[in-house]
Amino acid sequence: MTGTGPPRSRTGLLLTGGGARAAYQVGVLEAVADIRRSCAAHAQGNPFPIITGTSAGAINAAALASGAHDFDAAVRRLVDVWHNFHAGQVYRADSIGVMRTGASWLTLMSVGWVLARWRKLKPRSLLDNAPLLDLLRSTIPLPQIPACIAQGQLHALAVTASSYTSGEHTTFFDGAPDIAAWTRSQRFGVRETITYQHLLASSAIPFVFPAKSLMVNGSPEYFGDGTMRQSAPVAAAIHLGAERILVIGAGRMHEPKTDRSLAPPPNYPSLAQIAGHALSNIFLDALAVDVERVRRINHTIGLVPPQARGQSDLRPIELLVISPSQRIDAIAAQHVGDLPRPVRALLGGVGVTSDKSDFQGAALASYLLFEANYTRELMALGRSDAERQRDEICRFFGWTDPCAVDASGQAPAFVERRRDPLRLR
């Protein structure tokens, strides 16, 4: 039976970026689907009418949106892909493919601009992600999205990319006719039919994968990973009308801190360590800052009298955040050896080692480890973390959990969850 909680509000899902780390999201979604079925809430239809994503999260978001008519089946397809991943499905991992791209970068760094100018080397990326397009076409039926919107199974899908051309942060969305585009400082939303090129652009990790050209207001612009310069990850879902949002992160927020007292004296950082640190800054920090901003706003709004609050442009947004409870860098360190030999050799040139204690060096690899042993471990962590927050998930959706009983043996009454007032940003 379903719960008797509050009236269903428009629920959003935010899937953040992180390359291969996005396997964690799939584990969380699998657990949510399982909890939903155990609460007999599957008859309510798609639990996420608003879906937003960035980078690899945009790919997962598009997969869910294209299957909005059957959420459980869409999750199963995602699980199947991530459960059986290998790097060659995302980028050229063979010797020739790696030499054509990565070798050019290493040549440029080691020999210098003189030889690069003589050879007219213009490397575009460390890796060639051409195989990813084939994977997207075979697993994500994007043409189904307009039908899902028309039939009311999906309110909106949004994917975000960052323009190298204009320097602006662009959210491309497709959704119900009443959704208006928005403009904020250095970021805006534009209505578009989402294509595979949008997904490739949103997931083009800087330096690692090549930029993609997209049309914006009739002019071509080159785009890269949407997490770059993303100052407010939650904002797109709010603009699209979400009243409550499940946010699935990719690291740092709940990860245990490093015990510096047990760590050996640091050596000078390798290029891999610096690159991993930079990518973590791009992929992980903005979300944590945005969540902290929400908490500050909540505190401030709580001090405003209800009558004055009603006269402002504030409205309540409920947030539920699920993010890794373990350090993903440490998990990646256990699986660097799973990468294809040419990719290991390439990353070894910048300092990535197979030393399972080298967590910092493995940070860069954690975004590129599209290998089944690693993705399965992240999925298992996602399932475990979501199950640990099972009570919060049920309260968030208003589901009655048959597994939860009080001392009298009765299912507990629904308890209203505190709502987070946010400014429409």
Image (cartoon, rainbow, N blue to C red):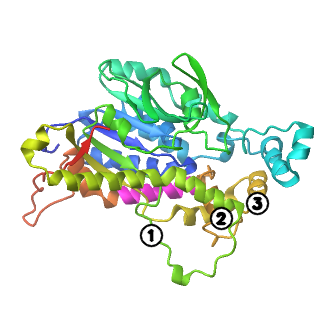
Q: Residues within 10 Å of mark 2 (few under 14, many from 20)?
A: many
Q: Main structural element of the magenta stretch: helix, strand or loop?
A: helix
Magenta run includes residue 333: no
Callout count: 3
Mark yes or no: residue 370 visible: yes
Which residue, given by chain and number where applicable, does mark 1 sit on? 256
The label on residue 348 is: 3
Per the model, the C-alpha gap separating discs 2 and 3 is: 10 Å
Q: What secondary structure is found at the residue carrying circle 1?
A: loop
Q: Amino acid at mark 2?
A: Gly
- Does the residue at mark 2 contact the one at mark 3 (Cβ under 8 Å)? no
> Does residue 307 appear to the left or right of 352 in the view shown?
left
Q: Residues within 10 Å of mark 3 (few under 14, many from 20)?
A: some
Q: Amino acid at mark 3?
A: Gly
Magenta run includes residue 376: yes
State the extent of the magenta-drawn residues as a range.
374-386
The label on residue 361 is: 2
